[in-house]
Image (tube, rainbow, N blue to C red):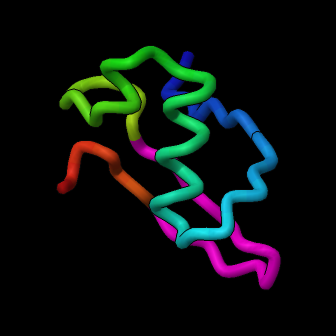
Amino acid sequence: MGPYIVTWTMYSENPGDHKAAAQEVAERYFQERIAAGEPDTACTFVVTNSKGESRQIDLAVH
């Protein structure tokens, strides 16, 4: 069995960039340590804007 990729899809109206949208969702829906980008947490997000442009955002990378 595995490995697996598990995906959550959340809608954000954040007017900022891809990282700002990921940060907002992390702070709102995930544990504080994830939103803070603590290594070895689920702090990597794929963010797609309204134009269909996707970026991988790792909150552990400052």
Q: Position of residue 43 (x, y in %)?
A: 39, 36
Up the image or down, 39 lies above or below 47; here it is above
Q: Is residue 28 magenta?
A: no
Seen at 61% across and 60% down, the residue is: 47
Q: Position of residue 17 (x, y in %)?
A: 54, 72
**Quadrant of residue 44 within the rendered picture:** top left
Tell me the chief SS of the magenta region: strand
> Which residues are drawn in magenta?
44-56
Q: How many marks?
A: 0
Q: Position of residue 60 (x, y in %)?
A: 23, 43
Seen at 18% across and 56% down, the residue is: 62
**Quadrant of residue 14 within the rendered picture:** bottom right
Q: Is residue 47 magenta?
A: yes
Q: Position of residue 39 (x, y in %)?
A: 19, 30
Seen at 56% across and 43% down, the residue is: 24
Does 3 sit left or right of 32 as displayed? Answer: right
Front-lying residue, 1 or 33: 33
Front-lying residue, 49 or 1: 49
Seen at 56% across and 16% down, the residue is: 1
